[in-house]
Image (tube, rainbow, N blue to C red):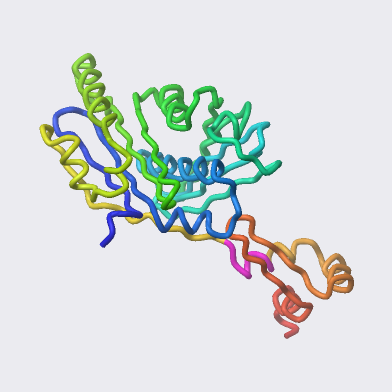
Amino acid sequence: MSNFDQLNRYLFDDLHVRGELVQLEQSYQQIIANHDYPQGVKTLLGELMAATCLLTATLKFEGEITVQIQGDGPVSYMAINGDDKQVMRGIAKLNQVTEAEGLAALIGKGTMVITIRPSKGEPYQGVVALEADTLAECLAHYFEVSEQIPTTMWLFVDRENDKIAGSLVQLLPDGENKEKQQQDYEHLCQLTQTIKAEEIFNLPAEELLYRLYHQEQVRLFEPQAVTYQCSCSADKCLTAIAQIGQQAIDEIIEEQGQISMNCDYCNTTYRFDQQQINAFVNPTKH
């Protein structure tokens, strides 16, 4: 089994710190496959995907999460949608074709919005200005401001092979000695900082973690698979078409012969003729 498309969670026993490691290949490649994104956009979308996986794993909830960044730069909007089962999809919308690289150059002045929709309970939204140079630093700031939990994140992109990866270290504020906790957290951040791109893209998680933390007591949990799945379907499109009313449906079909809908996420186009729409809208008559 490939060590890619997996999220690994682990705890440092006695140190009140937890860590995560995500390595993605096929799921990321499926997100970018049907889009002709410039390289800089692919890189940032990959970082956002890895970051969303790591973020989702820190939250104890069942439901969906959307992490979106938007601004006044060449890329107006970028989002990754996922859930607690690590099923992901993503999209970027461009104002113009750009060769720009990096968060500030692509997004400009902007914000990151994190929306959590639990299966039970009320949705929750956090907003943070994109004031740091990198996505990882912006997310660290988000945790600092909204959760008051020291968190550090590292994001990696292998542009040549379309792979992405990320690591996270987070303080668990549940011990007595705050000063020692902070020292332990900083020590583990320093160790994690030594990850090299060639290691995170080529080593299985267990081997990588051993290299980084062989002097620590690390408790590794069962890995979780990360998969890509678009949530579009013919039924969802037909439901949306039904909302516009029979008169509007008839007018579009008379003019175009059919109604087409395109999914922005996966670029699938759904086409429906009069008979298919009528059968859905008025099933008792068919």
Q: Which region of the structure is painted magenta?
A: 232-238
The image shows residue 131, relative to residue 74, as above or below, that is above
Q: Position of residue 155 (x, y in %)?
A: 39, 37
Q: Is residue 122 magenta?
A: no
Of 138 and 114, nearer the camera is 138
| Prevailing secondary structure class for the magenta stretch in the rendered image | helix
- Left/right placement of residue 188 relative to residue 217 reads right
**The furthest residue to the bottom:** 286
- Left/right placement of residue 254 relative to residue 107 reads right
Q: How many marks?
A: 0
When asked about the image quadrant of residue 215, the answer is top left
**The furthest residue to the top:** 179
* Quadrant assignment for the N terminus: bottom left
Q: Position of residue 111 (x, y in %)?
A: 58, 30
Q: Position of residue 70 (x, y in %)?
A: 62, 35
- Left/right placement of residue 267 relative to residue 221 reads right
The image shows residue 97, relative to residue 131, as above or below, that is below
Residue sitting at 74 percent across and 65 percent down? Answer: 241
Residue sitting at 66 percent across and 33 percent down? Answer: 73
Residue sitting at 40 percent across and 50 percent down? Answer: 163
Of 211 and 247, nearer the camera is 211
* Quadrant assignment for the C terminus: bottom right
Of 132 and 18, nearer the camera is 132
Q: Position of residue 86 (x, y in %)?
A: 40, 52
Residue sitting at 70 percent across and 79 percent down? Answer: 283
